[in-house]
């Protein structure tokens, strides 16, 4: 289903085939988009943001590369702040007097974390071409300008461009709600289970603007949903640009070291695409030693099923099982981790334990950082020699599915079978 949604949301706009880890990210983002009820308007907004990226890159590719890297290296912390606030809000369901102010806190976190981050490209665009604000000379520093400043700059643009309407990139966000809510805490609860925001000038104390905003629980739910859709639109526009223009990101160097939790989250997603659950990930603060535990799991449990989208589209599913070598796929996970998140000159020692479906340890091995240089060498590298232990020589089943037109399974099974590699079979 994720694959089908990714084809709908992203495939028409992709000029290059994404790397496997990026493809997994796009699948997950497509699922998120479906849950948010992303519409054609939001997809036009996504293309609008990509176009802004292209305009900025055409003027200065190196500067745009620095901006892109600055945005991407901040995303983990932004997501972590939002996740924490969202988790706290979920705990308060059923208690309106606590839920309402907590929802305002989530709203503020969205504004000053993810919106501040992903609105950076449109902000730099209106600064450069319309002079509606003044961006710093070092464009990458614009990442740290407040969400409110970016919102105001975008709101001032009254021109509707052929490529898109800037209003779609501020939907759900409002400085009055942000400031009167968890900004300056000018709110009060009513007996009707609503929350009232008093909009006042912080210098004079007088009411200003909308003066009084009253929100129900449903109002806040919809407001937060609008914020999520806008953030998705902004984010996927930047991602689309980065996929279609890999040289832009390659022209810049990351300046912020990866946090251990950040590395863990990315390795977890990559391992899952190889049918491994990341059971343990530890890394010392100096990043000299990493310990990992991986357990094989069946990524697809059902076979011979069908898929029905909310739009009425229906597909048959053909299950496929690939026979993979434990050692090759575990080394693939290590190669990904080391090349993406560690300096080649300072590779850590890595200890790995591997477990099968029955939770039996089938591999316990340790590699030195110097030996792992073989793994990250150009051209896929050589197999490193273990300092201790060995990986399992065995194989495991990696399962997936192919969707085909409904009612045509028998016809397409023959075509799929003819294209399968020697290590795969239809299940």
Image (cartoon, rainbow, N blue to C red):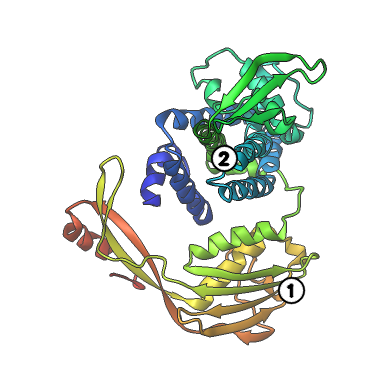
Disc 1 marks which residue? 370
**Extreme front residue here?**
191
Q: Does 411 sit above or below residue 249?
A: below
Give the number of the disc on residue 96. 2
Q: Nearer the viewer, residue 45 or 414?
A: 45
Which quadrant of the figure has residue 96? Answer: top right
Q: Quadrant of the C terminus?
A: bottom left
- Mark 1 or mark 2: which is in front? 2
- Along the horizontal axis of the image, is 427 left or right of 284? left
Q: Position of residue 58 (x, y in %)?
A: 62, 28
Quarter of the figure with residue 206: top right
- Residue 422, position as x, y percentages in the image: 34, 72
Is 409 located above or below residue 26 in the figure? below
- Could you tell me residue 362's position as x and y percent? 53, 84
Q: Is residue 176 something one can see in this rendering?
A: yes
Q: Are marks 1 and 2 in contact (CB under 8 Å)?
A: no
Task: Name which quarter of the figure residue 179 lies in.
Answer: top right
Going 66% across and 72% down the picture, which residue do you hit?
374
Position of 29 relative to 53 (above/below): below
Mark 2 crowdedness (10 Å alpha carbons): few <14, some 14-19, many ≥20: some
Residue shown at 43%/43% (left/top)? 35
On the image, the x and y values in percent for residue 87 come to 60, 50
The relative height of residue 115 versus residue 170 in the rendered view (above or below) is below
Estimate how packed mark 1 is, as few (under 14), some (14 to 19) or many (20 or more) residues with alpha carbons within 10 Å: some
Element type at mark 1: helix
């Amino acid at each position: 289903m994720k694959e089908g949604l990714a084809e709908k949301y992203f495939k028409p706009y992709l000029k290059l085939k994404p790397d496997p880890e990026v493809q997994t990210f796009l699948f997950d983002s497509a699922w998120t988009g479906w849950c948010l009820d992303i519409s054609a308007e939001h997809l036009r907004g996504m293309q609008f943001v990509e176009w802004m990226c292209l305009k900025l890159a055409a003027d200065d590719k190196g500067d745009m590369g620095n901006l892109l890297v600055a945005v991407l290296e901040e995303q983990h912390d932004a997501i972590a702040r939002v996740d924490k606030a969202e988790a706290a809000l979920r705990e308060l369901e059923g208690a309106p007097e606590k839920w309402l102010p907590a929802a305002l806190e989530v709203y503020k976190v969205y504004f000053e974390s993810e919106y501040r981050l992903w609105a950076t490209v449109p902000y730099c665009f209106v600064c450069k071409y319309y002079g509606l604000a003044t961006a710093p000379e070092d464009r990458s520093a614009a990442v740290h300008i407040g969400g409110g400043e970016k919102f105001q700059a975008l709101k001032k643009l009254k021109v509707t461009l052929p490529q898109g309407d800037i209003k779609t990139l501020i939907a759900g966000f409002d400085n009055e709600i942000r400031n009167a809510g968890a900004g300056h805490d000018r709110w009060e609860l009513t007996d009707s289970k609503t929350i009232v925001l008093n909009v006042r000038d912080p210098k004079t104390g007088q009411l200003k603007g909308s003066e009084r905003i009253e929100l129900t629980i449903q109002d806040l739910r919809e407001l937060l949903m609008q914020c999520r859709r806008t953030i998705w639109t902004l984010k996927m526009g930047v991602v689309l640009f980065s996929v279609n223009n890999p040289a832009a990101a390659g022209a810049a160097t990351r300046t912020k070291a990866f946090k251990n939790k950040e590395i863990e989250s990315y390795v977890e997603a990559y391992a899952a695409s190889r049918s491994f659950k990341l059971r343990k990930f530890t890394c010392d603060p100096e990043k000299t030693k990493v310990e990992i535990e991986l357990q094989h799991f069946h990524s697809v449990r059902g076979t011979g099923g069908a898929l029905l989208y909310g739009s009425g589209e229906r597909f048959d599913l053909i299950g496929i099982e690939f026979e993979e070598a434990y050692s090759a796929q575990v080394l693939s996970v290590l190669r990904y981790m080391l090349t993406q998140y560690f300096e080649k000159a300072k590779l850590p020692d890595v200890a790995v334990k591997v477990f099968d479906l029955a939770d039996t340890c089938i591999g316990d091995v340790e590699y030195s950082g110097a030996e792992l240089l073989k793994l990250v060498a150009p051209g896929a590298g050589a197999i490193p020699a273990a300092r201790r232990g060995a990986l399992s020589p065995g194989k495991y089943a990696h399962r997936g599915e192919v969707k085909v037109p409904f009612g045509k399974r028998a016809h397409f099974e023959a075509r799929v079978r003819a294209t399968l590699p020697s290590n795969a079979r239809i299940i």
